[in-house]
Image (cartoon, rainbow, N blue to C red):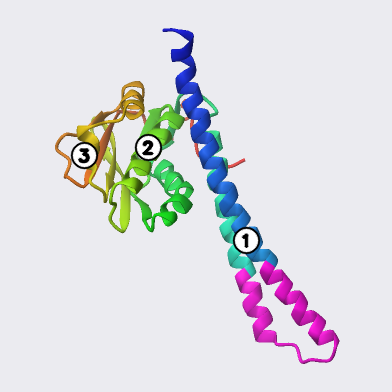
Amino acid sequence: MGGDDRKEPHAGRLAFFGRMAADVSHEFGNRLATINEKTGLVEDLAAAAEKGRPLDAARVKALARDIGREVRRADAVCRHLNRFAHSADRPRQRADLAEVLGTMAALVERRAAARRVAVRAQGAPGVPVDVDLVLLEHLIFQCLAWAFEHEPSGTIVISAIGRPDGSEVSLRGAPFARLREDLPGPLAAALAELPATLDPRAAADEIVLHLPAAGAVGDPCATTHGGVQ
């Protein structure tokens, strides 16, 4: 393998992290802008009260609720970004697949909204994977990015499914049969490297990634993922 071949996957991962960081920073900025706006309104009400106007307590309470809601949203954005960043801690990590999908759904929310699409993650916790998490997340992102450009339905559902011989990621809600028939080079390379295989029996609006078996997520000897620091 030549030097350029070694650099290409690394460059792709850096670009992926950059896109995610840019999306999240925009979303975080939106939350801060809303908090700033609501805070300004509270200050206006306080200034009016100092001049003798009766204080509208109901309005103040409503603004406080709005600010609290935006703080919770900003906190969720930070937590998802933190969890995503920790996926690069080690080349291979054991994780709960449902948690990984939930993080990816949250991180692409802004990108999906721009296409008027919702991404919903589902699946019971406890489906383990033991893989290169960054590569898995990048693979899921590539599938979602393709879907956003190819006539998606109103909602794309990504599901974590446990199997006796491993686990599966199902993405449903776009003409994924076309993607299966003509895989882009980077996506095919990611499948081979992970490794993962595509289920040829999937429905026309679905793509299913089959991942190899892993031990229990709670194994104390395993390197686990998901903590927020």
**x, y percentage for residue 121?**
36, 50
Residue extending farthest to the right is: 51
- In screen coordinates, is 55 left or right of 176? right
Q: Nearer the viewer, mark 1 or mark 2?
A: 2
Q: Amino acid at mark 1?
A: Val
- In screen coordinates, is 71 left or right of 115? right
Q: Which residue is mark 1?
A: 71
Q: Residue at x 17, y 40 (%)?
A: 202
- Badge 3 local density, few (<14 within 10 Å), some, or many (20+)? some
Can you tell which mark lies on residue 142?
A: 2
Q: Amino acid at mark 3?
A: Arg
**x, y percentage for residue 36?**
69, 65
- Mark 1 or mark 3, which has the lower sequence index? 1
- Badge 2 local density, few (<14 within 10 Å), some, or many (20+)? some
Q: CA distance from mark 2 to mark 3?
A: 14 Å
Q: In the rendered image, which quarter is residue 187 located in?
A: top left
Q: Which residue is mark 3?
A: 178
Residue 59 seen anywhere in this rendered image of the structure:
yes
